[in-house]
Image: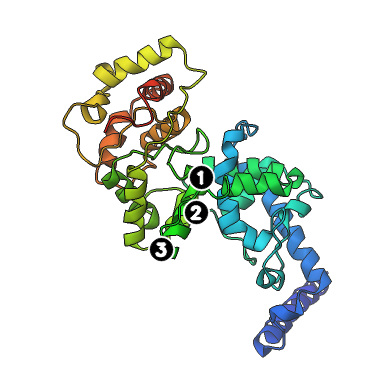
Amino acid sequence: MILTVRRAVLAVLALAAAGMLFAWSGLFNVAASTGHWPITNWFLHWVMQNSVRTYALATVETPPPLDDPALLPAAAGHYAQGCAWCHAAPGEPQSQIAEAMTPPPPALHEWLAHVDWTDKELHRIVEHGVKYSGMPAWPSLKRPDEVWAMVAFLDRLPDMDEATYRTLAYGEAGTTPVSGDAAFDRALGDCARCHGTDGAGRSDRIPVIGGQKPVYLAASLRAYAAGERASGFMQGAVADLSVETLDRLAEHYASQTPARPQPALDANPGEVERGRVIAEAGVPIDGVPACLSCHGEGRPRDVHFPRLDGQHRDYLARQLSLFREGERGGSPYARLMTAAVHELKDEDLEAVAAYFASRGGALAAR
């Protein structure tokens, strides 16, 4: 018995040595042009599927409701800019370079119709990417809410026709003005996919930026480009833009007067009133200061403090939550907001968002 075990150990060591010798020899062909052996392709996909399933069960929280149409525009815009090149889209084929990759990325609008990924598994893939492939991780791991928006978009992609996709991804055709500066016009067109040309935002998950302070907008854009403010959507959109283009975009949107967004339909008068009290007086017992001491109209305000009146409720609530969690940065004043809302309760956070969403017009006071 001892001899049999010894022989088995020696055989394993011999196989390992042979494998190392083969790897050292350089005879294994790593050229992408040859593709994988069928067994290699099967094994890698099998390992990937098992890994995604296990980590999705262990690390991904229960999905939020994903049937809200407001989740789709930003996700579709990001997909068109950063994903369709490899994964195709309705009416848009893959790049020939992507088709030559090993392994080749799937055309998702066709492939997703024939696979059985759960929403948690899709979240895992989108958020963390896949090793040994061209699939990168999400640009900001601090924004799982953005990843859920992408999952909501991917859920609908197999049944999406070309016209629906193009409207979601690009907005209304022919609405972007032409300045004569090709680089700026292209950048503005990319911004308009989510924000519209007037900065009203194409859903209540996208901020109203028309009429916002130019210094605040420029600082935010620079923070996104530098990766100092977390957003996979925004970091990818502005990473390659020059400082001059970022500043011009800020000036453009600051000069706009978008249509007034509708107040949140689910806000009740009691909730709005509670938000007003917190905005005007804070919550002294919890150390929460009055919001209007910095963000109020008619009071001394720094150019870095954004206007909040008429902002989308869902967007405001998410940003307040990010500040409270210490995940929102990108300006010298971020630490002030983190401290201000650190003890803000969920119901008070929602009330403050409802109050500012109900105030005035779309950032109307200038």
At horizontal 69% and vertical 86% (from top left) the residue drawn is 21
Residue 317: % across, % down: 43, 29
Quadrant housing the C terminus? top left
Residue matched to label 3 = 181
Label 1 neighbour load within 10 Å: few <14, some 14-19, many 20+: many
**Do the residues under discs 3 and 2 have CB atoms within 8 angstroms?**
no
Quadrant housing the N terminus? bottom right
Q: Earlier in the sequence, mark 3 or mark 2?
A: 3
Q: Which numbered circle lies on residue 194?
A: 1
Label 3 neighbour load within 10 Å: few <14, some 14-19, many 20+: few
Q: Identify whether 243 is placed above or below 152.
A: below
Could you give the CA–CA distance between mark 1 and mark 2, rounded to whole angstroms?
8 Å
Residue 349: % across, % down: 40, 24
At horizontal 35% and vertical 48% (from top left) the residue drawn is 252
Residue 321: % across, % down: 41, 33
Residue matched to label 2 = 190
